[in-house]
């Protein structure tokens, strides 16, 4: 029998509660992602001060915990916003919870996500299910590479050709699995932000809390999490970089960028190839490349993991202005001509990103203003 659902501000939770969260997650493969480590939520709570942790217990003790950000109209988002590629409740191995029931019991209007972990302990009705690309090197690099080459022969021939071309046309090509150079990290961030500006996407790296999060992770603020900056330098210049996050034997591909001047060599693809080759010697087994952009991800994957896209709503739908606007917008996306529907979807995604990243009204207004500029220019 469930006890009354409980909600805590992350800053008010005692150490023993965080310890119980770690114990609940430990050893459960579905929750291996670093973003489901309770210390990640605890860190976000320190730099943002707006993390709520929802807890359920039964006669056997702790049943589940789920950290979230609660926004306007009681709508929730993944802890860490745009930076949380995996999210959702962590549930005891011998139990299960229904997402819509959980939201209802905790008076949450809904949960927006593009990365809810799906497993036997979680009952959910996602808008869409996608599959994260996982590289499992349990048998070592040699066997992994041989199998992947057999399945994707043309792709790996292309990889070999690009490696040769890069080495032939430049005097020095250096791969570093765990690059400690601060300038390389700064260069990665600069390239990412330049790309956001060029593509007119919202700059999720601008907020102060994001810088604090990245800095504290790099400094080892979370004992069981480690960040690894892998780089590919060509003649001393950064050609590509991945700032990834590790939990146990899993490395999650996180912030990725490449210098446009080296684009003809597909340096991001070459770097991922090098990273996978180096995993076993660093005691790592899995590389989670996610389900997002990057057509080459599937060629490096020999396993997949299901994740769900929301929004998720409670059993008894909450009627408020935010919920009604969301449902109206979803109806328009589904029932308008294709071009208009795509534009509505783009606006919704941009809005979600701004609301998930910016935590002050001033910065949200600024974000919406910048997003509107291209449309205003066209109109004039």
Image (spheres, grey):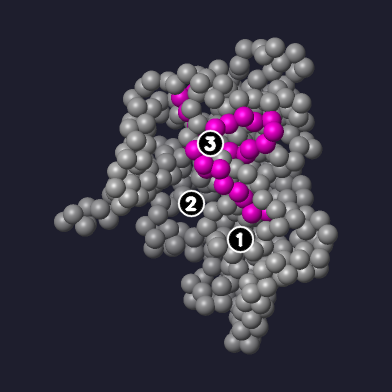
Kindly report the distance in space between the C-alpha atoms of the residues bearing marks 1 and 2.
24 Å
Badge 3: residue crowd in 10 Å (few <14, some 14–19, many ≥20): some
Q: Is residue 62 magenta?
A: no
The mark found on residue 205 in the picture is 2
Kindly report the distance in space between the C-alpha atoms of the residues bearing marks 2 and 3.
29 Å
**x and y percent of residue 72 in the render?**
40, 28
Q: What is the magenta range?
A: 108-134
Mark sitting earlier along the chain (2/3): 3
**x and y percent of residue 152 in the render?**
67, 69
Q: Quadrant of the C terminus?
A: bottom left
Of residue 286 and residue 306, the one placed in the foreground of this image is 306
Answer above or below: position of 197 versus 202.
below
Quarter of image, res 160:
bottom right
**x and y percent of residue 19 in the render?**
75, 29
Looking at the image, which residue is at 61% across and 81% down? 166
Of residue 31 and residue 42, the one placed in the foreground of this image is 31
Looking at the image, which residue is at 71% across and 40% down? 30
Q: Is residue 220 left or right of residue 72?
A: right
Q: Which residue is mark 1?
A: 297
């Amino acid at each position: 029998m469930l006890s009354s659902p409980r909600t805590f501000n992350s800053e008010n939770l005692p150490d023993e509660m965080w310890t119980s969260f770690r114990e609940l997650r430990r050893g459960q493969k579905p929750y291996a992602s670093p973003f489901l480590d309770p210390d990640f939520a605890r860190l976000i709570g320190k730099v943002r001060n707006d993390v709520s942790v929802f807890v359920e217990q039964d006669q056997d003790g702790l049943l589940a915990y789920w950290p979230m950000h609660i926004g306007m109209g009681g709508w929730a988002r993944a802890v860490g916003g745009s930076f949380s590629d995996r999210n959702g409740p962590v549930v005891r191995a011998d139990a299960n919870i229904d997402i819509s029931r959980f939201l209802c019991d905790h008076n949450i209007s809904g949960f927006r996500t593009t990365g809810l972990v799906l497993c036997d302990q979680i009952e959910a009705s996602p808008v869409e299910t996608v599959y994260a690309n996982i590289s499992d090197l349990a048998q070592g690099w040699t066997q992994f590479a041989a199998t992947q080459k057999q399945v994707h022969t043309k792709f790996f021939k292309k990889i070999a050709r690009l490696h040769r071309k890069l080495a032939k046309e430049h005097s020095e090509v250096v791969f570093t699995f765990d690059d400690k150079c601060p300038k390389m990290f700064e260069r990665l961030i600069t390239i990412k932000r330049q790309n956001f500006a060029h593509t007119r996407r919202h700059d999720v790296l601008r907020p102060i809390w994001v810088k604090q999060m990245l800095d504290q992770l790099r400094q080892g603020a979370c004992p069981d999490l480690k960040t690894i900056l892998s780089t590919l330098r060509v003649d001393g210049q950064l050609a590509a970089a991945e700032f990834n996050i590790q939990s146990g034997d899993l490395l999650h591909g996180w912030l990725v960028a490449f210098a446009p001047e080296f684009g003809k060599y597909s340096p991001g693809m070459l770097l991922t190839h090098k990273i996978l080759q180096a995993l076993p010697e660093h005691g790592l087994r899995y590389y989670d490349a996610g389900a997002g952009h990057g057509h080459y991800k599937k060629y490096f994957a020999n396993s997949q993991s299901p994740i769900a896209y929301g929004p998720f709503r409670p059993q008894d739908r909450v009627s408020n202005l935010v919920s009604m606007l969301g449902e109206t917008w979803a109806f328009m996306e589904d029932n308008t001509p294709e071009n208009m529907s795509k534009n509505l979807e783009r606006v919704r995604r941009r809005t979600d990103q701004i609301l998930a990243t910016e935590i002050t009204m001033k910065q949200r207004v600024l974000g919406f203003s910048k997003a509107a500029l291209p449309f205003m220019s066209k109109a004039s």
